[in-house]
Amino acid sequence: MGRLDNRVAVVTGAAHGERAALGSHFAKALAAEGAKLVVADLKDCASVAGEIVSGGGEALSVTVDVRDEQSTRDLVAATLARYGRLDILVNNAAIGSNIPPVPVLDLDVRAWDELYAVNVRGPFLCVKAALPQMRKQKYGKIINIGSQTMYLGLPNRLHYVSAKGAIMAMTRALARELGPDGICVNTIAYGLITSALTEHEMEQDPAHKARVFGPRMMQVHIRVEDVAGGLVYLASPESDRMTGQCLMVDPGSVCL
Ligand SMILES: NC(=O)c1ccc[n+]([C@@H]2O[C@H](COP(=O)([O-])OP(=O)(O)OC[C@H]3O[C@@H](n4cnc5c(N)ncnc54)[C@H](O)[C@@H]3O)[C@@H](O)[C@H]2O)c1
């Protein structure tokens, strides 16, 4: 018996990718605990859904643009048509892991708006689309994906860092608004995930590696295999008395 048997989960940004592709790992971890999955992305998620199904789980692949209100409504409609309920929403889709550093005076307003449309408006629209069903069920788990950068104040990525700050503020405000409906809203925030690409980048640039590892209480990498434990916890009934919080998975870089 899994910890998420009979639960239905939507994970945005769940396609396979060149970088961390955390969404695909989250989706597989939720499925391994018995959740029925909807994997959604601008890109095709069929291969991720296929992996879940070959592993004995259930999954539906949906194309979504989280910037677009109708598209997020269609995502929820497809979820309900397939499974009849929606318990877990993981707001993972984002522009982020590969944006180059840029000083504030050179940060283009279009880049700012484009990032906010995905990273802030996207989670808002997904919540708006999912909420009527969660309210009807009197149960829901909304999990937003944050970043340690919002606490560390990482320089030269003001749009990304401030958008993650907005996500944490949204988590608190929504948690208070939706608490009476039995809906938990939490953020899980990560430090830099080590993928083959980011490991190579750190090897090429020891100062960058020192910046990443310097604040960590544990001098260890965070690999994709390490990210799902906290997320499954936030999706499961084990965290039913936890809302409005931020769970840090960053080897001790930030103490809240
Ligand atoms: N990788 C890290 O080191 C790290 C660290 C902390 C937090 N995070 C956060 O984790 C999450 C996942 O990061 P990742 O590194 O796996 O990123 P990624 O770039 O590998 O994946 C992001 C996914 O979002 C999708 N996406 C982008 N715009 C979209 C849109 N408009 N509609 C639907 N889907 C869209 C992309 O197609 C992609 O598949 C993000 O919220 C990121 O900010 C990542």
Image: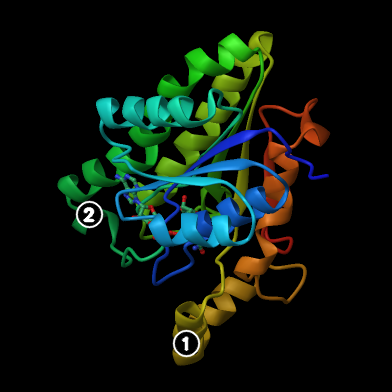
- In the depicted view, which residue is nearer to us: 256 or 72? 72
Q: Which mark is residue 107?
A: 2
Question: As shown in the figure, which amino acid type bears the numbered disc 1?
Answer: His
* Up/down of 73 relative to 45, above or below: above
Q: Visible in this render: residue 178? A: yes
Residue at 39% from the left image edge and 66% from the top image edge: 17
Residue at 65% from the left image edge and 59% from the top image edge: 227
**Residue at disc 2, secondary structure:** loop
**Residue at disc 1, secondary structure:** helix
Question: As shown in the figure, which amino acid type bears the numbered disc 2?
Answer: Leu
In which quadrant will I find the C terminus? top right
Question: Residue 182: x and y, percent?
Answer: 69, 15
Question: Residue 86: x and y, percent?
Answer: 56, 27
Residue at 32% from the left image edge and 41% from the top image edge: 64
Question: Residue 12: x and y, percent?
Answer: 44, 44
Label 2, residues with CA under 10 Å away: few <14, some 14-19, many ≥20: some
Q: Visible in this render: residue 215? A: no
* Up/down of 130 relative to 223, above or below: above
Label 1, residues with CA under 10 Å away: few <14, some 14-19, many ≥20: few
Residue furthest to the bottom? 204
The number of callouts visible is 2
Real-space Cα distance between discs 1 and 2?
26 Å
Question: Residue 229: x and y, percent?
Answer: 73, 54
* Up/down of 124 relative to 211, above or below: above
Q: Which mark is residue 200?
A: 1
Residue at 50% from the left image edge and 82% from the top image edge: 196
Label 1 vs 2, first from the N-terminus:
2
